[in-house]
Amino acid sequence: MVERKIRVLVAKPGLDGHDRGAKVIAASLRDAGMEVIYTGLHQTPEKIAATALQEDVDVVALSILSGAHMTLFPRVLDLLRENGMDDVLITGGGIIPQEDVETLQALGIGRLFGPGTATGDAAKYIREWFVENRADAEA
Amino acid sequence: MRRGSFAIMNESGAGALSPQLQRLADGFRSGDPLALARCITRVENQAAGFEDLLHALHDGVGRARRTGLTGPPGAGKSTLTAVVARQLRDRGETVGIVAVDPSSPFTGGALLGDRVRMDDLATEPGIFIRSMASRGSHGGLATTTREAADLMDAFGFDHVLLETVGVGQSELEVATNADSTVVVLVPESGDGIQAMKAGLMEVADLFVVNKADRPGADRLKKEIEVVQAIRAGSPMAAAPAHHGVDLSALSGHDLDPARGHVADSADSLPSIPDWEAPVLKCVASAGEGISELVDRLDAHFSWLEETGMLGAQRQLAALEHTRRVLERAVQRQAATVWKDWIGDGGRTGAFEGSPYEIARRLAGLVGRRPGK
Amino acid sequence: MSHVIDTDVPESADLQQEVERRRTELAELEAKLAEWEATSAATRQRDDTDFTTVSGQPIRALYTPLDTRDDDYLGDVGLPGDYPFTRGPYATMYRTRLWTKRMFSGFATAEETNERYKFLLARGTTGLSVAFDFPTLMGYDSDDPLSEGEVGKCGVAIASLADMETLFDGIPLDQVSVSMTINGPAIMLYCFLLAAAEKQGVPFEKVTGTIQNDILKEYQAQHAWIYPPKPALKIITDIFEWSSEKAPKFNTISISGYHIREAGATAVEELAFTLKNGFTYVEEGIARGLDVDEFAPRLSFFWDVHNDFFEEIAKFRAGRRIWARHMREIYGAKRAESWRLRTHAQTAGVTLTAQQPHNNIVRVAYQGLAAVLGGTQSLHTNAMDETLALPTEHAVRIALRTQQILAFETGIPNTIDPLAGSYFVESMTDELERQAEEIFTEIDDLGGVVAGIESGYFQAKIARSARRFQDEVEAKSRLIVGVNSFEEEDEPDIEILKIDESAGAAQHARLAELRRTRDGEAVERSLAALTEAARADRNLMPPMLDAVRCYATLGEIRDALEIVYGRFQEPVAF
């Protein structure tokens, strides 16, 4: 018998190279018992969607500090839906003004974490989402 | 999974797929990559009906060439895997990749970073990469990765590359389960002796000295050759030439697999030719030496085919896999029996009999419980 | 402290007496200190801190002359402007010239940024500092698919000489010094600037300014790279070589600890990694056959100024001393200009909190104070809202006023290096130097900086330090006001600058126009010549300038060199 592991893709789309947050969150999700796929910098939405599919992740977490969030989040969302992955949580973090957060959430993006978030909060949010939405997907 | 596909299979030979699994299998057969991805997830999680699913898709297994790549941490295996995959893809073949990284023994989590090195392949049609965590001892890493490879094989990939770090028995088995095994070493990983200690020398069909632009590459290559020669009982074969005479030319294990004969002058029997693992120098990050590596892999596969080794090797591996599937089923049954006996809250009070007596009694129930 | 002065040697009997007196004094102090320690150990200590710096250095409750007894004043501390420059790179420091208040800016298109620059110049700014957008920083054209959504967002988009001409339209490049934060494609932007000056009729030797051009820290921390380390170092050395003859007033590199620290490094890691990077550039120049005293005076540095006040001050002081010692003793530099470390500083963006953002004004003020006490040559103070967006003008003005208050109201610049002789600061300076030397040895054992980058050594060290800090914050063993302590339930919103989305479309149109109107064949030819020069390992500056003059774009030049050099593959390190 094997425990159902939560699989998370932590990705940095766009051209900004600030990966401190992405790496800290990746390591902390691992420490929370999840399997984290980390793909490195400068990921295009197409790459992120292809990776999410091949890895069959439950969650896609994007870290965006470049101000391009209004372009990148919707793009990833559309591509995942095109791939038939509409049951995947897209969440993330970065410097995102509140009104943009609201617009993105209305599109179907999950919670977005701002600067100063405790990494434990992100892990907790993902686990709760998983229990509610995915845990029995394969039962 | 608790629904006990094992018992059903025992009786009827195969489990009927649930509608959900049937849809998944249909998607798989129609070439939907998401179906492949989700089948692998089910196998990894040993989710309900996963063995039925594997059984249903088993007909397609056996066409792909499987290559294992292993070596110590930091040897550049992911980069090498990526450039080999690229080269195979460039000549029109399709490639599935299984990349294994260790799980944390403390938290059970894992950070799977192999894709960073394979970034250029992420959106390449005809390439499918799956990262897997070793997940401790549950179910056996070699078994799960084999099943993932079976799925990629059945899906129609021409090649399956299995990449894993060569530390520990279970990781090593992943690579050695393949048709060809490449052992990747780097100059700074120390001497060939370390590799030998790790059990890597025995499993190699090919050696790659990666990062060969760094100092010590030639020395490492020589060391590997000497260790190999010692293992073959001919320590002088690869020793440096003395007084201008190259001894290796005399004792000559120069096997040309294409010609399929042995050049060993001491052995007059025209029996099955030996495969002597070549030691190749590569700089994977610059793509240097990769064509030769791919050529040699082709040569090894031809050799396997021509000598009939391929069939024999695969037969053995299938047998071994069957044993493991059996053990896994028995373990699962044992777990159910144990759970019934121990009760939901755990058995804390006194119980009668020695552990051996109880275990024997419970063992009698294994296989008879149809499962829940 | 044994600062015996040679010219005034006392009689030997007097000397004997003096030594005896000093010995007795120290012995007495030792005894007293032991008593004090016993009392202190028996007294309750606060439990809301573990008394370490933000970098994890343990700090004792008390420092005394015993901590500096081994210092040789002239040898280790000395006078400002004198080797080893612990007290400052210049003899008279802020008595002659205050630090430069250099504020970094750039956004949207060249046209809009040009207007901002003219506004700043009209208000007395003498130096400009260009912030580029991410596509430019990575060497992509504004119309590259990878640039989508990022054009003009975090800085100005510059994709060709035409954009650079617009950026400095009406701004005389022989009078205004231009600092450009650019690394991977530094050579391209440098050539754009030089060619723009040429168009204005300004000869190269009159162009002043700085390019950051520090590629090693890009691999380690900031990640705006293009090519692998070896060709990237070759390009930097090309710039050194060409500039020392043709553009001698230009600062060809700003060796930066800022981004290393921001990515999570500790103070001593910032110090050691940055200096080691500097030594690596020096070694490359020497290996090319350049005279170290020709190019070393053009090297400058860039430190981060973090929260831990004394540690930061000690870092500035230790940095100057280590650089001087290595340049003189190891690299054989003969000129004082080669020994002296000049630095720019910026307050630590990473310390700004999104929670209660007004508190950031206070953080920035303390950090600015540390930079000035550390003896910086120029300073950028962050605006309080920079963790949320590009700063508003209002926030930038407060940041600038913070520096002016420091300069004109506090009296701090009146005397040079006022913390010298502090038992604590001197011993911290010594300790940072000692630890940095240990790290140098570690890097040497790995085979040097490039080998360390390839194996992920730096990246892993930085990631681990970042993680340690985050763990401390989450465990509340390190308190951050407003984040894990003293939180407010209802925080008032602050005004945020919104960049409109039109820059991308405008740049697309501009580039399309450029590609249509330029001489396409000349572009092809010049790019082929550039590729050829790279293959033949010649200095890239002349063929690059030719390509730039033909209006080859940033992305085209990037590609022309990538054919030969390949692309850097990020090592995975956690």
Image (cartoon, helix red, strand yellow):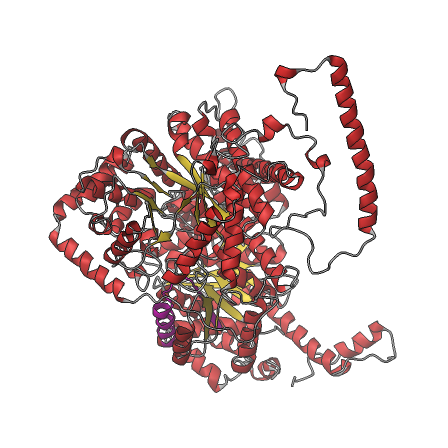
Locate residue B240, reporting x and y percent: 52, 27
Locate residue B31, reporting x and y percent: 37, 73
Which quadrant does the C terminus of chain C fall into? bottom right
Determine whether, in the image, residue C20 is placed left or right of residue B334: right
Based on the picture, tell me whether residue C136 belongs to the magenta stretch.
no
As displayed, is residue C192 above or below residue C92? Answer: below
Q: Give B155 or A18, whichever is nearer the viewer.
A: A18
Q: Give C450 or C427, whichever is nearer the viewer.
A: C427
Quadrant of res C542: top left
Determine whether, in the image, residue C522 is placed left or right of residue C229: left
Q: Which residues are magenta?
A: A56-81
Quadrant of res C23: top right
Locate residue B345, reporting x and y percent: 76, 82
Residue B46 appears in view: no
Q: Give B297 or A36, whichever is nearer the viewer.
A: A36
As displayed, is residue A76 above or below residue C143? Answer: below
Which quadrant does the N terminus of chain C fall into? top right
Based on the picture, tell me whether residue A78 belongs to the magenta stretch.
yes
Locate residue B184, reporting x and y percent: 51, 47
As displayed, is residue C359 above or below residue C247? Answer: below
Determine whether, in the image, residue C210 is placed left or right of residue B275: left
